[in-house]
Image (cartoon, coloured by chain):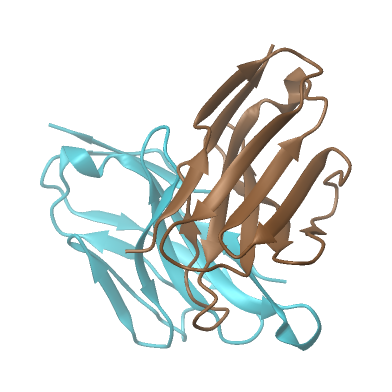
Chain colours: A brown, B cyan
Amino acid sequence: GAVVSQHPSRVICKSGTSVKIECRSLDFQATTMFWYRQFPKQSLMLMATSNEGSKATYEQGVEKDKFLINHASLTLSTLTVTSAHPEDSSFYICSARDRKGQGNQPQHFGDGTRLSIL
Amino acid sequence: GNSVTQMEGPVTLSEEAFLTINCTYTATGYPSLFWYVQYPGEGLQLLLKATKADDKGSNKGFEATYRKETTSFHLEKGSVQVSDSAVYFCALIAPTGSGGSNYKLTFGKGTLLTVNP
């Protein structure tokens, strides 16, 4: 089945560091990828929609300058948490939608990145 | 707007018990419905889906039927196993934005299932 690889799986770093998370679709092309944030014991919160070759669309309340998204190819989107602080610690999950097929087809999720800022 | 309401957990069952997790939705247009499962420390995996009324999605012994009249998509399994312990999310995709150009997943809050041997 469709596979989405997310890397790294876990990051621990000091406050003020910028952290880049990669999301790759391994066996399909994705014009659209999604970035979510999940707090402990809560549901996923959509942060932004990443569109290949154009600017990402951010959800209300998500800081564009804080969470930089780049979708440079049909198989790769990156999320950079700039100057991370302890309140940015969370579980970040990406998903991708196969460019073949309609928009109401299921998204395929990566395994998530646990970000811990000290 | 679109929303998903699912049964709040946690749900604790003994092995081989019957499972039901209720899910109802509100949506503009005609949504597609999904159940995703999240095992501890992992991302989400698609469990099953249904794209039109009366469709039944099924996988790994789990089933859910798209009921348009009751706007529901309840998840069921006849005999749960310890390995089914996870968080289950009901979700929908319905077109949003101008011209229905966006297809965003809307999730329920998730239901934690624990199955004891």
**Quarter residue A115 falls in:** top right
Q: Is residue B49 rendered to the left or right of residue B109?
A: left
> Farthest front residue?
A73
Residue A15 vs A80, above or below: the answer is above
Q: Is residue B27 visible?
A: no
Where is residue B60 shown, x and y percent of the image? 19, 60
Q: Please tell me whether residue A98 is drawn above or below residue A81 in the rendered image.
A: below
Q: Kindly tell me whether residue B85 is visible in this rendering.
A: yes
- Is residue B4 or residue A13 the one in the foreground? A13
Nearest to the observer: residue B86 or residue B41: B41
Nearer to us in this view, B67 or B100: B100
* Drawn side of residue B82 relative to residue A46, left or right: left
**Residue A87 falls in image quadrant:** top right
Query: How many numbered tags mark residues here?
Result: 0
In the shown orientation, is residue A118 left or right of residue B77? right
Q: Residue at x 78, y 21 (%)?
A: A85
Q: Quadrant of the C terminus of chain A?
A: top right
Q: Position of residue A111 (x, y in %)?
A: 45, 42
Image quadrant occupied by the N terminus of chain A: bottom left
State the residue at coordinates (42%, 38%): B42
Return the x and y of residue B22 as percentages of the image width and height.
40, 60
State the residue at coordinates (70%, 60%): A50
Hey, which quadrant is residue B99 in on the image?
bottom right
Residue at 57 percent of width and 39 percent of height: A42
User: Percent position (x, y) of residue B100?
Assistant: 72, 84
Residue closest to the eye, B77 or A1: A1
